[in-house]
Image: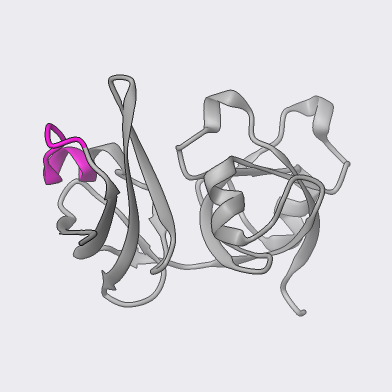
Amino acid sequence: MPGYETLRVKEAYGIDVNEGIARIDYYTMDELDVVSGNVVEINGKGKTVARVMPLYPADEGKEMIRMDGLMRENAGVDVGGCVKVRKIKTRPAKKLVVLILKDFKEIKDMDMAEEFDGVPILKGNRMIVPYFGGMLVFTVLQTFPAGPVTISRSTVIERKYKA
């Protein structure tokens, strides 16, 4: 696929879990024409998006991508599998409609937007907000505008609940 790089999936560094970050080496960043903070699309059996950051020096040159478990789930890939990665552009998310799968009532919509400030997302992806020993788990049903978007503090998050 033109504009894509194929990389082997490894576990995320602990610091990157639930942050919407995928790490690749500098060579791959150059090949994709991305810099830290740019957004990439990651294709396995599914698709997800992430902000790209460089791997730690010990991982340079190993043709790998480090992704957390939720990102791997969204991309439909396991550790050791391969994904295709390419640079994309996102638009600011004005609104998200999300289906709450597991809820803590204490988390208000604005808190969710603040938690994910700067995180790119696609319709159909799952997200998690850790919260005092529990977590809010949801699936993105719609994004406004459509397509890959980046959440900001001003993003309106409309909740729907599983019946």
Q: Position of residue 32 (x, y in %)?
A: 70, 62
Nearer the observer, 65 or 54: 65
User: With 17 as the anchor, is 55 left or right in this view?
Assistant: right
Q: Which picture quadrant has residue 156?
A: bottom left
Task: Answer yes or no: is residue 10 visible.
Answer: yes
Task: Answer yes or no: is residue 39 visible.
Answer: no
Vertical order, 98 against 9 (above or below):
below
How many dots with numbers? 0
Query: Residue at left 34%, top 67%?
Result: 91
Furthest residue toward front: 163
Quarter of the image where the C terminus is located: bottom left
User: With 126 as the anchor, is 22 left or right in this view?
Assistant: right
Query: Residue at left 76%, top 79%?
Result: 2
Read off the magenta span. Answer: 104-113
Quarter of the image where the N terminus is located: bottom right
Query: Residue at left 58%, top 24%?
Result: 14
Identify the image's colour scheme: rainbow, by chain, secondary structure or one colour. one colour
Q: Position of residue 116 (x, y in %)?
A: 31, 43
Query: Residue at left 23%, top 41%?
Result: 103
Vertical order, 103 against 14 (above or below):
below
Nearer the observer, 38 or 84: 84
Q: For residue 98: magenta?
A: no
